[in-house]
Amino acid sequence: MIPFNKATFEGKELSHLGQAVIDGHLSGNGPFTRQAESMLEQCHGSGRTLLTTSCTHALEMSARLLDLRPGDEVIVPSFTFVSTASAFMLHGGTPVFVDVRDDTLNIDPDLVEQAITPRTRAICIVHYAGVAATPDRFREIADRHGLMLIEDNAHGLLGTHAGRLLGTFGHLSTLSFHETKNITCGEGGALHVNDLGLLERAEILREKGTDRSRFLRGQVDKYTWVDVGSSWVLSDLLAALLVGQLERFPDIQARRASVWQRYDAALADWAAALGVRSPHIPPQAGHTSHMYFLRLSDLDQRTRFIAHLKERGVMAVFHYQPLHLSAVGVRLGGRSGQCPVSELAGDTLVRLPLHNALTDSDVDRVLSSVTSFRG
Ligand SMILES: Cc1ncc(COP(=O)(O)O)c(C=O)c1O
């Protein structure tokens, strides 16, 4: 079976990991953490990066930085991973689900404007599949309404919009290094802080609400409890793996891009003949080849397509189920028909294997398996 995803560690990841063990700095804030954070800052070109235990936790830090009060609303797409919404709910907010655009499956700015109320505090956008969600437009909307913009950039590190890097438009942005992402340390993430006025508090929240970071920098002679935070610091062992991945990042991206482009070129005629939709990349978007997905006509056709590929040894998987129709979403008032594009994408989207362990012959087999499906 050709797996849907497989992390590869082909550079210095294991030797860095061994070095971290030998050096004995196993907790967070060690030399590999500092190196990874500085490499991620270079990837963004501006702002400061704090490694976290996951993207979910970086989103939770964003929620804490908002100091949400009961009734405060945060606008999120319905078509996203649960953490984009749950992080804000866990820290006192109410997610407001908005539909995505039919072309990119990114949250729709016109619908976001309509969803803003006096209780809205923030907008959290996702660059689905690493394709930009017009972040300049969202920043303009956020600024006009006095809201915070957060980019859940779990898929989009090194992606661009009109030449500017994703993750640099929001006051804050978040990254994931879960094993399904382009670069990984198993579980991990980062909060990227563009609004530097938020940095010191972010450091405190990540360190259990203490000013330990100031202490480690020698700015205070002891550290103490100053805010309500949590344990969101990544172990230096995982940061060591991440440094190895970041060193290989250009190569990883290039290989993913070549598979993505092969899929796209080779499937164009088949997709057009069957009415299957392939990804739409707007001209201003430089995407990250995070995933290659197809959109079939309905749930039944997608179920048959996934089974067809499985019979041929190809593991293809569906993706997000719309959050407004989840058990929690329904408790919040979600109803069928509220976000029709998200609902259809939940039923019809399927992702093909895309990772650096794919050989040319694997890609050939994926392509022949896909094109032997007749609808
Ligand atoms: C858009 C998005 N946000 C957040 C997450 C959560 O990432 P993590 O597993 O690092 O918490 C995911 C996970 O796949 C995701 O797709």
Image (cartoon, rainbow, N blue to C red):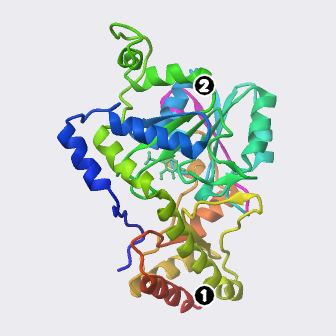
Front residue (pair 215, 154): 215
Front residue (pair 72, 143): 143
Give the label, 2 or 1, closer to the camera: 2
The kind of residue on which mark 2 rests is: Leu
Tell me if residue 200 comes above or below residue 38 in the rendering.
above
Q: Residue at x 59, y 91 (%)?
A: 374
Residue beneath label 1, please?
375
Residue 338 visible in the picture: no
Bounds of the magenta segment: 88-102
Determine which of the numbered discs, if any, sits on residue 127 in the image. Answer: none
Residue beneath label 2, please?
196
Q: Is residue 29 magenta?
A: no
Q: In this rendering, would 48 be left or right of 179?
A: right
In the structure shown, which secondary structural element does the residue marked by tag 2 occupy?
helix
Q: In this rendering, would 128 be left or right of 17?
A: right
Residue 307: give x, y in percent of width and height: 45, 81
Residue 175: give x, y in percent of width and height: 51, 45
Q: Residue at x 34, y 64 (%)?
A: 10
The kind of residue on which mark 1 rests is: Gly
